Amino acid sequence: MSAPVDRLRDAGWELPPLPTPKGLYVPARRHGDLLHLSAHGPFGADGGFTHRGVVGDTLTLAEGRAAAAATALSLLASAAAALGDLSAISGTLRMAGYVNAAAGFEDHAKVLDGASEVLDAAFGPEARPARSVVGVASLPFDLPIVTEATFVIGADDG
């Protein structure tokens, strides 16, 4: 069992089952010391989506943050499958979030903070990524958020 998984469990989070791709792509692709993760939605323990809807309309900010946390756990499940162990990851280089948001909604960064909290629990705040977040008019499957990331494998040079 990897130390990141233990830290996640201590924080009250569990990795979901490996999500099934919803198109013609791979969930993770390694290149050198980088692991690039495709956009992931909020998968849950039952293999289905944990949340659906529009943040600021049918979902609250708190529900959006919970959906973002679920996307981060889904990313980590794919990373664990690709690498065999999350302890090979030294941090997150970059993360991007796309929030299905109501017109006028302005707290996109607070939504993505839900994913950042999961990554902080797994790898520590010193391994935080550079990140971007934008609001979009819709997402596949009526998802409230999708998140993609690039993880650093091995020593992080900064």
Image: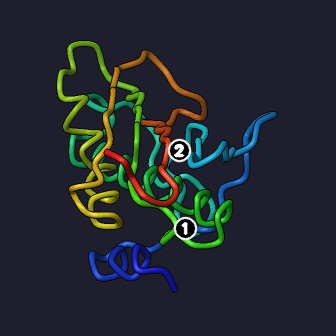
Mark identifier at residue 16: 1
The spot of residue 134 in percent (x, y) is 34, 21
Taking the spot 29% from the left edge, 54% from the top edge, the residue there is 127
On the picture, is 22 further left or further right than 121?
right
Taking the spot 21% from the left edge, 14% from the top edge, the residue there is 104
What crowding class fits label 1: few (fewer than 14 Cα within 10 Å), some (14-19), or many (20 or more)? many
Query: What is the secondary structure assignment of the residue under circle 1?
Result: loop
Tell me if residue 48 comes above or below residue 39 in the rendering.
below
Q: Give 23 or 139, whichever is nearer the viewer.
A: 23
Mark identifier at residue 41: 2
Tell me if residue 53 comes above or below residue 3 in the rendering.
above
Taking the spot 40% from the left edge, 48% from the top edge, the residue there is 92
Tell me if residue 20 comes above or below residue 55 in the rendering.
below
Q: Give 137 or 20, whichever is nearer the viewer.
A: 20
The type of residue carrying mark 1 is: Pro
The spot of residue 87 in percent (x, y) is 48, 72
Q: Give 155 or 65, whichever is nearer the viewer.
A: 155
**Coloured how?**
rainbow
